[in-house]
Image (cartoon, rainbow, N blue to C red):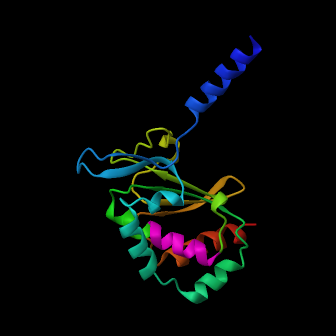
């Protein structure tokens, strides 16, 4: 009896586990899109790799600003909300990953959420994040939001991120 109970618990946990890198068909274009919680490996799928790799390789963050960002020792976490159907996301998210790679930013400190055109994460409720436009890069310090980069950076991704981090440190 105990074995059956344990098997049922295991099956229940497995069925409720969130599937990463879920692909579904976009209602408008009919093309594959990512939805829900993802990781960087999702961009290795042939549906996404071409635009991701192209945008990643062409982006050259400003070295002086990257050097300034390195002084913050990755003492923040990030949530990225994007849509693979969105041209801004397809441009800015690979650029942001290039910046994060230069910062040697730990993958485990990044939450990547893909949404459909209605800003629905399907398997994850993003309503509390108040996402109006994608991509949205949310920066946290000790689980408290300290700033956002929404859709396109004001100056550059690295400059805007530096400004967010400077603002929180000057308020201490």
* Majority secondary structure of magenta residues: helix
Query: Does 61 appear above or below 117?
Result: below
As for residue 102 lying within the magenta part, the answer is yes
15 versus 111 height, above or below: above
The answer to whether residue 126 is magenta is no
Residue drawn at (66%, 58%) of the image: 108
Q: Position of residue 127 (x, y in %)?
A: 48, 41
Q: Nearer the viewer, residue 37 or 71?
A: 37
Q: Residue furthest bottom?
A: 64
Which quadrant, please, contains the C terminus? bottom right
Horizontal and vertical percent for residue 139? 60, 61
Query: What is the span of residues highlighted in magenta in the rendered image?
Result: 93-103
Along the viewing direction, whichever of 36 and 44 lies nearer the viewer: 44
Which residue is depicted at the point 42% across and 59% down? 45
* Residue displayed at 50% across by 74% down: 157
Tell which residue pokes out farthest to the top in this image. 1
Tell me the quadrant of the picture where the N terminus can be found.
top right
Q: Quadrant of residue 54?
A: bottom left
Relative depth, front residue between 156 and 9: 9
Viewed as shown, does residue 142 lie left or right of 28? right
**Depicted 46 relative to depicted 128: above or below:** below
Q: Position of residue 138 (x, y in %)?
A: 55, 58
Marker count (numbered):
0
Residue 146 placement (x, y as % from top left): 62, 60
């Amino acid at each position: 009896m105990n074995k059956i109970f344990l098997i049922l618990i295991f099956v229940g946990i497995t069925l409720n586990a969130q599937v990463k890198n879920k692909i579904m068909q976009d209602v408008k274009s009919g093309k594959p899109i990512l939805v829900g919680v993802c990781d960087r490996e999702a961009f290795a799928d042939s549906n996404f790799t071409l635009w991701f790799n192209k945008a990643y390789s062409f982006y050259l963050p400003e070295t002086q600003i990257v050097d300034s960002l390195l002084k913050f020792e990755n003492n923040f976490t990030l949530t990225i909300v994007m849509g693979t159907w969105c041209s801004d996301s397809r441009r800015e998210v690979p650029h942001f990953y290039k910046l994060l790679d230069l910062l040697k930013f730990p993958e485990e400190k990044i939450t990547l959420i893909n949404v459909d055109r209605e800003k629905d994460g399907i398997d994850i409720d993003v309503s509390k994040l108040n996402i109006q436009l994608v991509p949205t890069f949310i920066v946290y310090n000790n689980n408290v939001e300290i700033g956002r980069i929404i859709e396109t950076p004001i100056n550059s991704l690295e400059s805007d991120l530096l400004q967010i981090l400077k603002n929180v440190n000057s308020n201490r």
